[in-house]
Amino acid sequence: MLEQFTDKLRGKRILVTGGAGFLGSHLCGRLLAHGAKVICFDDLSTGTRENINEYLGRDEFAFVTGDANKFADLSNVFDAEKIDYVFHYAARVGVKRTTEQPLEVLEDVEGIKNVLHLSNKHNVEKVIFSSSSEVYGEPVEFPERENGHVNPKLPYASVKHIGEKFMESYHKVHGLRTCSLRFFNIYGPKQDSSAYGFVVGIFIKQALSGGPLTVLGDGTQTRDFVFVDDNINSSILALLTNATDGHVVNIGTGRPMTILDMAELVIKVTGKDVKIEFLPFREGEIRHRFPDVSKMRSLLGYRPMHTIEEGVRKTMEWYQGRLS
Ligand SMILES: NC(=O)c1ccc[n+]([C@@H]2O[C@H](COP(=O)([O-])OP(=O)(O)OC[C@H]3O[C@@H](n4cnc5c(N)ncnc54)[C@H](O)[C@@H]3O)[C@@H](O)[C@H]2O)c1
């Protein structure tokens, strides 16, 4: 499915905001592999040069340091050359970080406005916006459907919801082709594993350094884990599929697992003899995630290809490389 599309990326100029971050850097790599010219725009607040080191110096890759929330910074990029596609991934991320600094998250609305205004003005062909399953908050129905209830609890989630609405309205009012992707938990190499809560990376680091693995509550809370390569495949398909224009689409596997099962899987994959320690459940933590992925399947014709075990193994190999 993907192969028949990706030739369409050859020679296209693609702006990736947040391109030095976890997802953005994987995306830049994949777009380059498909023959695109990539402009990676990032303020390096959570992203790193290390993430994009392998692309620096390539003719088809440009790295621009700037703040997407500052109109002039982003405007310079659009003025410098014709941009065909935009992936707007720049955002303040991490539940803990964004709850502690809610006003900083609110500034991301400016970035969304800037991206939409400039993309419309410069006749960009399509904009992909990275939204989040956090828009569902504590879900009131399962599975979580794009046109069902949303219940954003966090400032971060409210900003994502605003972003979706403005993507939709720019499509309706200005005819700008946009699509918002509600990403469920993505994991894989390069993911920041700080105390700000990316559980797979945290478990792997804990296991590799002798444990224990710290599970919040009894570990029966669920998440839908997507390996980064599968997430990138979906995002590229969403860009190249006209049927996603003006839509919001869940990107997940549709097969959630418990945090305890994930901890046990990490122990199995790493082969370490480590214990699990149970800590008090964190106030405000979402109990369950369970996306309806039928829209993703019907519009994109895509199902994630990596088994959870393969994904965790690849992630572990990356951490082993870093820790050795
Ligand atoms: N990783 C996940 O599981 C997940 C889930 C749902 C949604 N998302 C969304 O996907 C996107 C990428 O997330 P990620 O996990 O790669 O996080 P990340 O922190 O690794 O990437 C975000 C990048 O944006 C940059 N950035 C932040 N604010 C910026 C600004 N104002 N101007 C320029 N650059 C800025 C950061 O330096 C970083 O490189 C984010 O929008 C996030 O909300 C991620």
Image: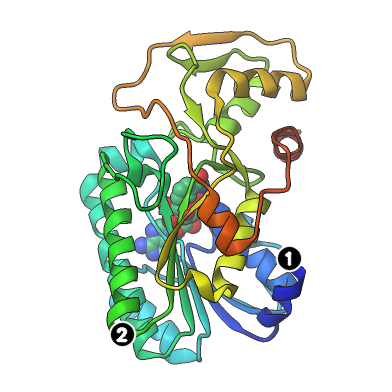
Q: Which mark is residue 1?
A: 1
| Amino acid on which disc 2 is placed | His
Q: CA distance from mark 1 to mark 2?
A: 30 Å
Q: Residue furthest left?
A: 103
Mark 2, residues whose alpha carbon is within 10 Å: few (<14), some, or many (≥20)? few
In the rendered view, would you say 113 is above or below 11?
A: above
Q: Quadrant of residue 70?
A: bottom left
User: Ligand 1, what quadrant?
Assistant: bottom left
Q: Quadrant of residue 241?
A: bottom right
The first of marks 1 and 2 along the sequence is: 1
| x and y percentages locating residue 151 in the rendered image | 27, 41
Q: Residue at x 53, y 9 (%)?
A: 277
| x and y percentages locating residue 300 in the rendered image | 60, 62
Asked if marks 1 and 2 touch (Cβ < 8 Å), the reply is no
Q: Residue at x 31, y 78 (%)?
A: 172
Circle 2 is placed at which residue position? Answer: 174
Residue 46 visible to an observer of this rendering? no
Label 2 element class: helix
Q: Residue at x 37, y 38 (%)?
A: 95
Q: Residue at x 44, y 38 (%)?
A: 143
